[in-house]
Amino acid sequence: MNKTFKGFLTILPIVASVFVTVYLVTHRVGPAQKQTEESIRALRVIKTASIDLVPRVIGYGVARPGWVWEAVAEVKGTVLSVNQHLKSGEWIEEKSVLIQIDPTEYELALARLEAGVEETNAKIKELTEEEKNTQSLIAIEQRSLELAQKSFDRKIEALKNNTLSQDTVDREERNFLQQKQSVQRLVNSLALIPSKRKALNSALAVHQSNIKQARIDLARTTIIAPFDCRLGDVSIEAGQFLRAGQSLFKAHGTAVTEVEALFRFEELRNLLSEQMRKRFQPGLSTGEFKQLFNDVRVLVSLQSGDWSAQWDARIERLLEAVDPKTREIKIVVSVDRPYEKAIPGERPPLTSGMFCRVELQGPVRAKSIVLPRSSIQNNDVFVIDRENRLQKKQVEVDFTQSEFAVIRSGVSIGELVVVSDASPAIMGVKVLPEIDDGLQEHITTLSQGERAKQ
């Protein structure tokens, strides 16, 4: 009994602790439950809009004069005088006399040739008179021959009748033959007159040809500017002897300045409509190329430091050669009257050697949708739906230009397109769209292009 009670006392604390533990476990208070909220991401977006797109392609080239005159001495001689403006860099007007070479030698040569022409003309006139005189003499001598013939015939009859001696007949026959010989001599002289006239006419033609050449040489002693130009290096002085063929100086025409620029074939196609693109194939002639790009606007611009200048230009010609390294097409564009369009302090004249930017602008494409190129990845864009949730759309790109792409299909006007980094991109996630007005304005400005100052 005593042992039983002691065992009970030993087990009782253990049982009590078990009951307490069970009670505490079953009646403990758990941690407070917090209600979870959906996370929202802030992303920059732009709203797609209908834009009047100006397709453009950019090329670069160096300006050069459309006309270059290399003055060459075409005749030899001593320089008598030079124009006071015949100096490097000077402006020269069309038809200005620049150099006068001593013309004395050529004037004397011309005078000798003109005297030769007068002499030949006199001989031709003399030959004509000789022809008339010979014809008259032939008529007279022919009549004398007829009379001699009759007299000879009578004496023959008398000889037959034995009323006249043979000696008398022989003398009459001799007179008849001499008269016939005189007629024949005159006929022969008359027959030679056409050949003499032909020889004189040939000599006259040679003299006249030499006179024309002499007059040309005489005119070449005066060197005149063929068009308005600006002079290059000049080193001609009065008293200097010039050789025929000696190079004198170069002058650049001021009426037209050309720029030869390179363009990629596929970029040029973007300036054309879908139907016109089919006609744009390698190997086009200049005429076909100009007809195909008839509506293209051409701008030539120059950037130097913090100022820039622009000129309207036109397509002049298409060069046949293609750049072997870049496979680019060479197009020559022209700026008319570049010096007249100069504005002091604002736009300089477009002169030789300037490195220029050439921009070709196609016809305006109304209601176009453009997006930044960075917003398109593998032809996919992220958009924000009406519930401000992130979604992905596939787009079809018509072509890319500068910093943007022209969208043919896939998005519509008014959609919000993500332009910032959306990774990790979880479709359906809640988004707080932030309109990037600066980027939107920048893309719009780029897509609409600029026009040249007139």
Image (cartoon, rainbow, N blue to C red):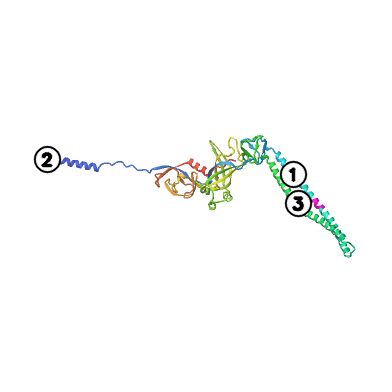
Percent position (x, y) of residue 270?
52, 48
Q: Nearer the viewer, residue 86 or 435?
A: 86
Percent position (x, y) of residue 315? Answer: 58, 46
Residue at x-position 40% and y-position 43%? 40
Q: Residues within 10 Å of mark 3 (few under 14, many from 20)?
A: some
Q: Earlier in the sequence, mark 2 or mark 1?
A: 2
Q: Residue at x 75, y 44 (%)?
A: 115
Sequence order check, earlier mark of 3 and 2: 2
Distance from the alpha carbon under mark 2 to that under mark 1:
169 Å
- Name the amino acid type tagged 2: Lys
Quadrant, the C terminus? top right
Between circles 2 and 1, the one closer to the viewer is 1
Frontmost residue, 188 versus 25: 188
- Distance in Å between CA atoms under marks 1 and 3: 21 Å
What percent of the width, then of the height, locates residue 105?
A: 70, 39
Q: What span is in magenta?
A: 128-133
Q: Secondary structure at mark 3?
A: helix
Nearer the observer, 192 or 379: 192
Dot 2, how many residues are within 10 Å of its Cα: few (below 14), some (14-19), or many (20+)? few
Tell me the SS state at disc 2: helix
**Which numbered disc covers residue 161?**
none
What amino acid is at disc 1?
Glu
The residue indicated by pointer 3 is 196
Q: Which mark is residue 6?
A: 2
Is there CB contact under 8 Å for labels 2 and 1?
no
> Where does label 1 land, which residue?
114
Q: Amino acid at mark 3?
A: Lys
Q: Position of residue 260 (x, y in %)?
A: 56, 44
Mark 1 or 3: in front is 3
Question: Looking at the magenta stretch, what is its main secondary structure?
Answer: helix
